[in-house]
Amino acid sequence: DVKVTQSSRYLVKRTGEKVFLECVQDMDHENMFWYRQDPGLGLRLIYFSYDVKMKEKGDIPEGYSVSREKKERFSLILESASTNQTSMYLCASSPTGRSGNTIYFGEGSWLTVV
Amino acid sequence: AQRVTQPEKLLSVFKGAPVELKCNYSYSGSPELFWYVQYSRQRLQLLLRHISRESIKGFTADLNKGETSFHLKKPFAQEEDSAMYYCALRSSAGNMLTFGGGTRLMVKP
């Protein structure tokens, strides 16, 4: 059974702090993603990675960066947290290829910036 | 650019009533369409995808390329269907999913 694990479920950080959100998948998937989920806006892609050390910007990369040093781990970094980054963050992974490939999600990390 | 629109933020029906969650998309190529569901306090999970032409938990969805729609339907709603539903599109270019804004389905007893 595919497992995508986000280590922090609930975080409260102060404005200006540097924040790390960690995600690990155990199915040797090439692709990993970070989304944020906001009411009425659905899920918006922040960054994705299709291989170790490779990254591509999604729809809303501003204020975020990512790191993928190992295939199973994909980290989202908020260099200087702001209140408008209060949100639910979802990590996901999928194998390479298209038809029929499913994207698997983690349980999410609730981040509140005060 | 690809876009997914779910016009209803909230849909409330009584148990046993038919339900249709609307999804429209814009994409110039051949997309793959999906429905994801998120039950209370659970992770987002795949409900169904158009290429499988399957019925899951009584739900079906047909891709209508002429109307660029992928509406989710169930003839008789159950209380356990109450959840957040997201329509998503994957382009032919890669593995990214573009999501709609989501529809919260509430099935009342």
Image (cartoon, helix red, strand yellow):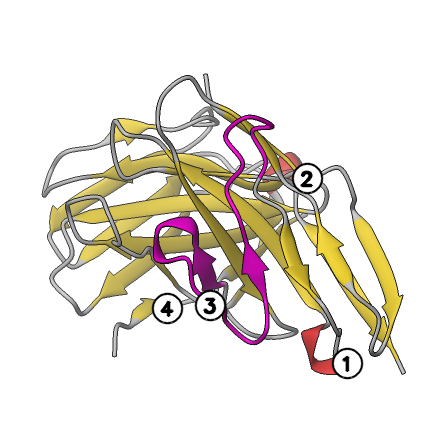
CA gap, disc 4 to disc 3? Answer: 10 Å
Q: Nearer the viewer, residue B27 or A67?
A: B27
- Circle count: 4
- Give the crowd class for mark 1: few <14, some 14-19, many >=20 residues within 10 Å: some
CA gap, disc 1 to disc 4? Answer: 32 Å
Are the two marked residues, 3 and 2, in contact with CB atoms closer than 8 angstroms? Answer: no
CA gap, disc 2 to disc 1? Answer: 22 Å
Disc 2 and disc 1 on one polypeptide chain: yes
The answer for which chain carries disc 4 is: A
Please, what is the three-letter code of the amino acid marked with disc 1? Glu
Name the mark on residue B6: 2
Q: Nearer the viewer, residue B81 or A34?
A: B81
Name the mark on residue A46: none
- Give the magenta-colored segment's residue range: B45-69
Name the mark on residue A7: 4
> Is residue B7 part of the magenta span, yes or no?
no
Is label 3 in a helix, a strand or a loop? loop
Please, what is the three-letter code of the amino acid marked with disc 2? Gln
Task: Classify the position of the C terminus of chain B by image quarter.
Answer: bottom right
Whichever of labels 4 and 3 marks the residue nearer the N terminus, that label is 4
The answer for which chain carries disc 3 is: A
Residue A103 position within the rendered picture, expressed as x and y whole percent measured from the top left: 33, 55
Whichever of labels 2 and 1 marks the residue nearer the N terminus, that label is 2
